[in-house]
Amino acid sequence: MTNGPRVAVIGGGAFGARHVAAYQGLGVRVDALVDSDAATRERVAARHGIPHTFPTVADLLAAGTPDAASVCVPGSAHRAVAVALITAGVPVLVEKPLAATVADAAAIVAAAEEHGVLCQPGHILRHSPAHRALHDAVRAGRLGQVLAVSSRRDRPRTLTRLFPDDHPALLTAVHDIDLALWYAQSPVLEVRATARTRPGSATPVLVWAELRHANGVVSSIRNSYLLPEHTPNHTSDLVEVYGTDGVGHVDLAQPTVLVQADRTEAPDWLLSPADGGGALAAEIRHFLRRVDGGEPTAVVPLADGLHVVQIAAAVADSAAADGAPRRIPPSPSLTGASADDPT
Ligand SMILES: NC(=O)c1ccc[n+]([C@@H]2O[C@H](COP(=O)([O-])OP(=O)(O)OC[C@H]3O[C@@H](n4cnc5c(N)ncnc54)[C@H](O)[C@@H]3O)[C@@H](O)[C@H]2O)c1
């Protein structure tokens, strides 16, 4: 398809390549790839037939403005990249977390508000059919009044090696924090957390957190990076919602395809398949419909993306302070994590 939007993907690493495949699977032209690493640029552009590549966002913008862009650089670079694109009027889908710090996330929100440009936080699980079905049940009142949310996410030890500077609260627990906001339908006021490290290391490999929401819901979040190398992602993921009239859960711990040979493999075709599709394609389809004005309602309001970063930062802070509670000041712009907010 040559009509339709011309999209740029910023960051051609592991997840940026999945964005490229997802756009192309939807028949959308990925016109440009930006990556500061020349070898990555060339490899990913050649594999996916992307006509233009640039080392920086400034170079991309100097050559012309794309109709939309995915920001898939590491979290510490989200602010610079997203603000440059937003300032140039380019709608952005920013991978999770919205930014690596609260100040960076607030700067992205301020730029989007100042320039009136769409910024969609990349909380992919709100686009997963199973997680949406549980949300639909909650919203329909089938579980009664929600009392508590619980979630588990175990990952291989590889993550500590690949992302030594990223706190698990911001790297992976942001998925669970976002689900907690979505299912509790209420902002978080207070956080207590514990982190454990291996002897002789300062890098957390396990984080347990308790979130207290404004409406009284309590969310419990457990993330670890202790599984053997090559354990597939998602094969422990579990989220449970407890209500006055029942309990609902999404359990990804039983993959449909499991190959256990020299290593264990469970291809991901639910969330972000390597060749496109899944929840990532649904997220991108929603983003493009938001860009062209066909979808007035944000599945992930921008204020929720900021709030997730506030909560994750508070989790890391509480864990560093031996579980001391951390209060999160109520934000006047916060939507209350409603899926129906049109911002
Ligand atoms: N939604 C999910 O489930 C999910 C899963 C994995 C990663 N992610 C997110 O996707 C983003 C990318 O993660 P990844 O695993 O692909 O990382 P990665 O390290 O594999 O790739 C990042 C790429 O960005 C490039 N880069 C870094 N700074 C840049 C800059 N300023 N300008 C241009 N290019 C730059 C690097 O050269 C690298 O190729 C992160 O925000 C991460 O949190 C989301």
Image (cartoon, helix red, strand yellow):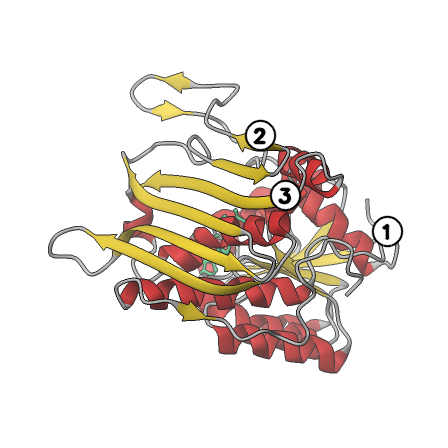
Q: Quadrant of the N terminus?
A: top right
CA neighbours of label 2 inside 10 A, class few (<14), some (14 to 19), many (20+): some
Tag in front: 2 or 1: 2
Q: What residue is rendered at 33% in x and 17% in y?
A: 261
Place of residue 140 in the rendered image (x, y in percent of width and height, measured from the top left): 76, 39
Q: What residue is rendered at 47% in x and 47% in y?
A: 14
In the image: residue 103, left or right of residue 59 = left
In the image: residue 192, left or right of residue 13 = left
Disc 3 Cβ-to-ligand 1 distance below 8 Å: yes
Callout 1 amino acid: Asn
Q: Which mark is residue 280?
A: 3
Kind of element beneath mark 1:
loop
* Frontmost residue, 140 versus 274: 140
Disc 2 Cβ-to-ligand 1 distance below 8 Å: no
Classify 225 as above or below 68: above
Q: Which residue is mark 2?
A: 269
Residue 334 visible, this orientation: yes
Q: Earlier in the sequence, mark 2 or mark 3?
A: 2
Place of residue 255 in the rendered image (x, y in percent of width and height, measured from the top left): 49, 23
To which quarter of the image does residue 80 belong? bottom right
CA neighbours of label 3 inside 10 A, class few (<14), some (14 to 19), many (20+): many
